Amino acid sequence: MRILLIEDDRETARLVQETLVKHGHDVVAVSDGVEGLKMAVVGVFDVLIVDRMLPGLNGLDIVHNVRNAEVRAGIIFLTAVGGIEDRIEGLESGADDYLVKPFALGELVARVAALGRRPPAPMQEVVFKIETLEVDLVKRVARRKGDIIHLQPREFKMLEILLQNRGRVVTRSMLLEQMWGLELDTKSSIIQTNISRLRLKIDRPGDVALIRTVRGLGYMIDDAQ
């Protein structure tokens, strides 16, 4: 695989690059956030490994911009910032995985390999139409009454999960597992916060409300009243 490593610690960058090359990967390493973002957007990489604390531009901003540019590469944060809220923030920015320093090089190699062999999510439908909402899961475009809805990567992922389970309850546990892969209290405010953000964009004033709360269970999307 072709890998972009954005890491400003020289020794860490050297060890990671040498290890991944030994495992047959082509690794390009940069130490500046601005340069890293430029290469991530214009280059063709299978995996990005990104530190959070970088000169020029921090890792969160890099990942936000990369996903907004619709770059599909797998992304792993490799960072000393390891609190649970920090990990949630990193995954919400659009990263696929989060590894905290100090780390085992073997674990990083395994996580890179896992991203490389991750198959695309199976989809029974490509385009969903509910009332005046239309969502194309391939083009990653959502519209309501013909107007494009600008969704962040995590918002679109949550909408996709709801759509794939149209008419069925999606529990908080399901959302936590599929979106963050974290074992958190199902009463965590992270779910409610993200649902509220999605509702503000999908269910605008005057529109039929499509995203509904099923008290004590979770959420569902449907046009049935």
Image (tube, rainbow, N blue to C red):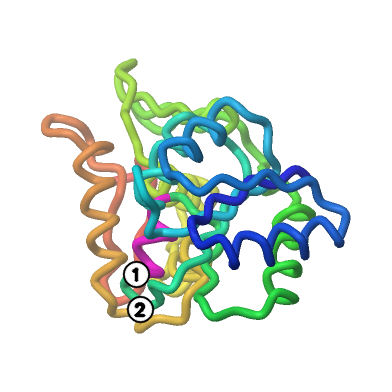
Q: Nearer the viewer, residue 140 or 205?
A: 140
Find the distance from the CA under tag 1 to the CA under tag 2. 5 Å
Left or right of residue 222, residue 21 in this image:
right
Residue 33, quarter of the rendered image: top left
Going by the numbered disc 1, the residue's amino acid type is: Asp
The answer to whether mark 1 and mark 2 are in CB contact below 8 A is yes
Q: Which mark is residue 52?
A: none
Residue under pointer 2: 83
Residue 12, percent across and down?
A: 59, 66
Most frequent secondary structure within the magenta stretch: helix
Secondary structure found at label 2: loop
Q: Please, is residue 59 above or below residue 216 in the view?
A: above
Q: Please, is residue 105 above or below residue 128 in the view?
A: below
Residue 190, percent across and down?
A: 28, 67
Secondary structure found at label 1: helix
Q: Please, is residue 144 above or below residue 137 in the view?
A: above
Based on the picture, tell me whether residue 96 belongs to the magenta stretch: no
Residues drawn in magenta: 86-93
Residue farthest along the top direction in this orientation: 146
Based on the picture, tell me whether residue 87 belongs to the magenta stretch: yes
Residue under pointer 1: 86
Going by the numbered disc 2, the residue's amino acid type is: Gly
